[in-house]
């Protein structure tokens, strides 16, 4: 059979799939495909963009949180955990980016697997990135446990303690799984071993972390959802901080799980690292949004709030009466009126014959505010039994 002519050979040659030879001392030349080189650079660019977006989001929110959080809220333990989590998340992503800009990812070192010229400092940077990720998981799990504790304050003591014990065990499982991954990965870095044999450990750690986040978010959303429903039953339908925390809890339940699935289904590398970033961002963001809503509602009461007060306190207290006259039950003297609204010189008191009960949601709101969630509305409400019927 005749050999192909040079012209035919040139036409069949594909320069985009050709191979180049890499010379390695003491070894024969190593052929490397152009497609492998393209994949090498493409992976570095995609993962650097991924990590960079997390750095920008974390540090930007950190600055905003420090500037906008009220002074009295900065002493709460949840605020401290949120600040630490954002700082850790930004730093650990910077350290992970340094791997792809340092000597570990140089072309020759990567393809020849020759890391003899990599300084010891680069090993420490890579290990530090793993350690900071472990500390980030600890902060997030602790913050989630505290938030579950805050919203479960109105539960029976037995149920509350059982839930807290279960929450602690779930958080502990996520922390232990991440610790095991950190130890094994650090050993592989120091020994310059391939980590492919331990990929199951990385997948298990990610799955346990996502499961713990979903568990805490489900508890959070369920408790707030029930509270919102009960408030609606007694006529408290106004948009409040509880609705905001319910929405953000739903986001924390769904979005990290989506990124965990994309870790296995998407060609974009390390999307699983977005799971921790999403939680670190959503937790303080929900508190900021809720606090802003509470402050706005406190400064500009709306007509629905007046209607709610009338329903809760009784229409007689808001009826138009001549200045200086007493209310029908004789327990209150009004000084002046404007459009049916009374300005009192003494505290409003209910009739002795009218049974009252404390709003069951006040403790939930007050405790959540004390923990730094931004839920508490600032005033307790006394609810007449007749108003709740």
Image (cartoon, helix red, strand yellow):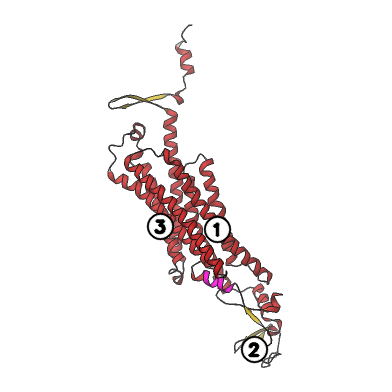
For residue 224: magenta? no
Regarding mark 2 in the picture, which secondary structure is present there? strand
Dividing the picture into quadrants, the one containing residue 359 is: bottom right
Magenta-highlighted stretch: main secondary structure? helix
| Residue at position x 35%, y 48% in the image | 127
Above or below: residue 230 compared with residue 271: below
Mark with earlier residue (3, 1): 3
In the drawing, what numbered circle is on residue 331?
A: none
- CB contact under 8 Å: marks 2 and 1: no
Residue at the spot of label 2: 336
Let me know if residue 264 appears in the view.
Answer: yes
Regarding mark 1 in the picture, which secondary structure is present there? helix
| Residue at position x 48%, y 49% in the image | 274
Estimate the spatial distance between the alpha carbons at disc 2 and disc 1, rounded to whole Å: 49 Å
| Residue 137 horizontal/vertical position (percent) | 44, 55
Q: Which residues are magenta?
A: 360-368
Residue at the spot of label 1: 217
In the drawing, what numbered circle is on residue 87?
A: 3
Q: Nearer the viewer, mark 2 or mark 3?
A: 3
| Residue at position x 51%, y 60% in the image | 167
């Amino acid at each position: 059979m005749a050999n192909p002519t040079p012209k035919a050979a040139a036409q069949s040659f594909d320069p985009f799939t050709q191979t180049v030879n890499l010379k390695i001392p003491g070894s024969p030349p190593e052929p490397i495909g152009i497609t492998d080189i393209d994949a090498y650079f493409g992976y570095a660019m995609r993962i650097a963009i991924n990590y960079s977006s997390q750095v920008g989001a974390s540090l930007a929110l950190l600055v905003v949180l420090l500037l906008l959080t009220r002074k009295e809220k900065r002493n709460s333990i949840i605020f401290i955990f949120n600040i630490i989590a954002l700082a850790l998340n930004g730093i650990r992503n910077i350290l992970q980016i340094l791997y792809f800009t340092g000597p570990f990812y140089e072309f020759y070192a990567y393809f020849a697997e020759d890391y003899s010229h990599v300084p010891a400092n680069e090993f420490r940077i890579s290990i530090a990135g793993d350690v900071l990720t472990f500390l980030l998981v600890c902060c997030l799990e602790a913050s989630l446990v505290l938030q579950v504790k805050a919203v479960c304050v109105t539960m029976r003591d037995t149920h509350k303690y059982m839930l807290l014990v279960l929450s602690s065990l779930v958080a502990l499982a996520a922390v232990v799984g991440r610790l095991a991954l950190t130890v094994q990965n650090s050993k592989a870095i120091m020994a310059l071993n391939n980590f492919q044999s331990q990929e199951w450990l990385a997948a298990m750690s990610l799955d346990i972390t996502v499961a713990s986040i979903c568990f805490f978010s489900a508890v959070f959303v369920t408790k707030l959802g029930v509270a919102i429903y009960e408030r609606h039953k007694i006529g408290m339908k106004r948009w409040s901080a509880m609705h905001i925390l319910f929405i953000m809890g739903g986001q924390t339940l769904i979005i990290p799980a989506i990124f965990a699935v994309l870790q296995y289904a998407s060609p974009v590398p390390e999307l699983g690292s977005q799971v921790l970033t999403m939680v670190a961002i959503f937790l303080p963001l929900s508190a900021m949004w809720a606090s802003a809503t509470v402050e706005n509602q406190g400064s500009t009461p709306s007509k629905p709030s007046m209607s709610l007060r009338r329903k809760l306190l009784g229409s007689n207290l808001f009826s138009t009466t001549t200045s200086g006259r007493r209310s029908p039950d004789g327990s209150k003297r009004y000084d002046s009126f404007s459009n049916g609204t009374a300005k009192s010189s003494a505290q409003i008191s209910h009739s002795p014959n009218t049974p009252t009960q404390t709003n069951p949601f006040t403790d939930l709101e007050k405790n959540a505010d004390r923990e730094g969630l931004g839920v508490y509305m600032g005033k307790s409400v006394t609810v007449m039994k007749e108003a709740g019927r």
